[in-house]
Amino acid sequence: MENYTFTHLSKTREELLAGSFSATSLTELYLKRALAGDRYNAFLEVFNDSALATAKRIDDKVASGKPMGKLAGAIIGIKDNMCYQGHKVSAASKILDGFESVYTATAIQRLIDEDAIILGRLNCDEFAMGSSNENSSYGPVKNPINEALVPGGSSGGSAAAVAADLCMVSLGSDTGGSIRQPAAFCGLVGMKPTYGRVSRYGLIAFASSFDQIGPFTKNVHDAELVYQIMAGRDEMDATSSSRLVHESPSAKDKFTFAYYEEVMNSPGLHPRTKALFVEKLDALRAAGHEVISTSFPYLEHLVPCYYVLTTAEASSNLGRYDGVHYGRRSEASQDIPTTYFNSRTEGFGAEVKRRIMLGTFVLSSGYYDAYYTKGQKVRRLIKDATDDILKKADFLISPTTPHPAFKVGEKANDPIALYLEDIFTVQANLSGNPAITVPMGTTDEGLPLGLQLFGRSFDEATLFRAASLI
Amino acid sequence: MEVTDKTIDKLSDLSRLNFDGEERDNIKRDLEKMLVFVEKLNSLDTDGVAPLVYMTEETLQLRKDEVGEALSQSEALKNGPSHDSDYFKVPKVLDK
């Protein structure tokens, strides 16, 4: 058991049902790995008691011959911004110190209903704000491939835990690339569903019109399985879609892939990223797919638009942390105003405060139309232009990030670097489309690079199909 | 655009956040930088473009107006930093 090597969820399930091991021994193994092997600061807490209790329940079910869920034997870690009743959740923020969930996120409940075991909660950037996991109140996460490097963010712990085999699958949330970028940096598959596909009930809100929960996995098949279980209408999230989840994929086996000509000529693109991407496009052509170049008139507006709208939504969403209803209250409070001011000033980290301030600015009277409404108009232009491209092509294809994982502490506050960091990923959150990253290869130093596929809204089935082809 | 002390005062009041000393200089500088960054949106002509407000294209459905299970009072109070069995407690509002 000690040396158990995980490959696919379906294989683990079969082994469990065949009696190769018990869910309890599997859970004990992963608890041990997560505790002892976590040099990466990926787990903030392992749910020892509830994980073993669930394992026992699964073993009893196996013994009595009851039908088993699709995720029997799956050991899953969750990002520390998802509620699981009776367990702590903090969004990696001091302001939620001591908070314990009073209900369970729908996405997590659906996994549990299929006999998944929730192993623990995973480190992330505070309130999911960041691209390197250096903004956590509980310290940075290290990249298991090279500990001097960041794992990406904001779901850095979710990526590191799967890459280091501390769990089999993990959940992250993606507001501007927070699943896809760390998945690419850690050599994994990471997927953001269409906006509205997976219920946000029980996900601690960052930017409500952008946030989506999605999986980190070692292969496309597991990502599709976990996605399908989580997806679908939920009464508790009014924005969750009623559309059928199990639509069949396109019957085509040759697709049209569009890429941005501008991206190829971008000076910020790592030479190895470009070389691998060109190789991929050639391989697609050789396999009979059509590859077309296109241009996107709003490339340099993507990240500014994203910042205006997400900070506005964040400043509003984070208004609820008042030091009264939950979380942490400053010791230094003498009255109501100082309770609010001091609790928030002490509880939030620098990046969260920056974004609240910018969001408050763009929503304040006198600037609302010039910034917030303007951002919403640009979002419409971006969405319409994206839809136009996906009329000509089945998928948009790009590198997931311009370069591989960078060193801890390396990213200075360089706006150009910032703009390039998120450029390939934010478009899917602005337009709402589903997108997936799959490993594309490595640099000479062995650092993984990701390839992103971006598909039509609510056609995840075809997106997964194409992702498993390439 | 230049971010003035008055702007910082107003925003920090609306945000219920204090910025003192070095932190005040930092947030001023950062805000200026971020505003220059998002200024790029103004290069686009958006006359006649309808703002994209809702990401869902489906008509939102109202749920049935039925009494259902919700959080119990004790659960709702549980995470409050200060509470008794019925209420959240806050520091004194009125002086004697």
Image (cartoon, coloured by chain):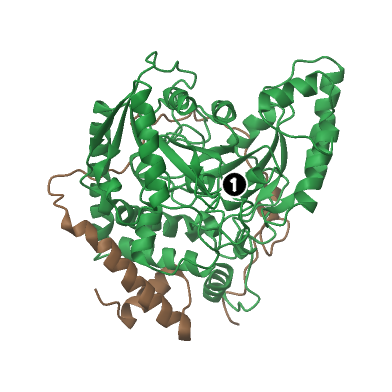
Among the 4 quarters of the image, the one containing residue B13: bottom left
The brown-coloured chain is labelled B
Residue A193 makes an appearance in the image: yes
Badge 1: chain ID: A
Q: Position of residue A131 (x, y in %)?
A: 48, 56
Residue A398 makes an appearance in the image: no
Q: Residue at x 48, y 77 (%)?
A: B18
Give the structural element (helix, strand or loop) at label 1. Answer: helix
Looking at the rendered image, the quarter that the N terminus of chain A falls into is top right
The amino acid beneath tag 1 is Ala
Which residue is nearer to you in this view: A247 or A451? A451
User: Label 1 belongs to which residue?
Assistant: A159
Q: Position of residue A360 (x, y in %)?
A: 37, 64
Display colour for chain A:
green
Q: Residue at x 40, y 34 (%)?
A: A453
For residue A153, side relative to residue A381 (left or right): right
